[in-house]
Amino acid sequence: MRLATWNVNSLKARLDRVLAWTEAIGPDVLCMQETKVKDEAMPELAFRALGYEVAHHGLGQWNGVAIASRIGIGEIQAGFQASDGWTDDGGRFLAATCGGVRVASIYVPNGRRVGTEFYEEKLVWLDRINEWLITKCNPAEPMAVCGDFNVAPADDDVYDPAAVHGATHVSPPEREAVARMREWGLVDIVRRFHPDPGFFTWWDYRAGNFHKNLGMRIDHVYVTEPLAARAIRAERDRDARKPSTYPGIPSDHAPLVVDFHDQAS
């Protein structure tokens, strides 16, 4: 099974690029974030032409998550609810079962700036996703949580720790929330294959940051141990971030691609 995740930064603006990349790379399951389209505007026919079924959860101009699968898609859950009635239905969470693996595509709030209401909302969202894992999921079953976490888990995941110290994406509460996901039983499978610093997934469009590799690792594929045991490689496709490799303009994120054996060996 080939599993990919990509913050596409608007399907409307980048559909040709996403389709060309999908056809070239051939993921069995593709999780997308920031689709920025409503459910009824999701270009399902274009994905079906490539052999994919699609589930989508989006409200329009902002957010939006999707899962495209060519190995089946079922048990779809759009948004999630906490035990106290708190509900997220803002186009940030979508889960489905694909080829016997439970897959979640998530887009964690950006947080904007530490100390703001947006930052507090981000911390609440991260707390709720941890509650969802604890109450609704089983670390002994094959599962993947993929997407734009908007958190760089360690200093090696940013180009200059001193430059971003204390800012959103790297603040201790955010990192602690993501660490709790790992403590529950999720494995940072990309880091397992790429322990080296400088392995980033996002670069600001400005000032040639991509070419200078001044970026952050904020996109992740977290999997339970039964799925981690099947992983054979994990890569980041920098070509998809380059302007000239595929049609149209690039997202500011690069996709991640992880390959798994069909069964543990």
Image: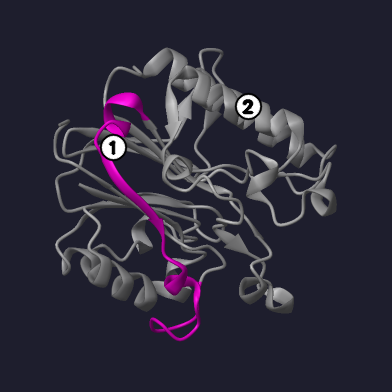
State the image coordinates of residue 100 (x, y, percent, origin top left).
17, 33
Which label sits on residue 177?
Answer: 2
106 magenta-colored = no
State the image coordinates of residue 4 (x, y, percent, origin top left).
34, 53
Tell me if 237 is positioned left or right of 250 in this view: left
249 magenta-colored = yes
N-terminal of the pair, mark 1 or mark 2, is: 1
Q: Is residue 110 something that shows in the picture?
A: no
State the image coordinates of residue 15 (x, y, percent, origin top left).
38, 73
Q: Is mark 1 on a helix, strand or loop?
A: strand
Residue 122 vertical placement versus 233 (above, below): above
Identified by mark 1, the residue type is Ala
Do the CB atoms of the residues marked 1 and 2 lie less than 8 Å apart? no
Give the Cα separation between the discs numbered 1 and 2: 23 Å
Q: Is mark 2 on a helix, strand or loop?
A: helix
Q: Nearer the viewer, residue 51 or 203?
A: 203
State the image coordinates of residue 201 (x, y, percent, origin top left).
54, 58
Which label sits on residue 135?
Answer: none
Residue at which label 1 appears: 96
| Chain part drawn in magenta | 224-250
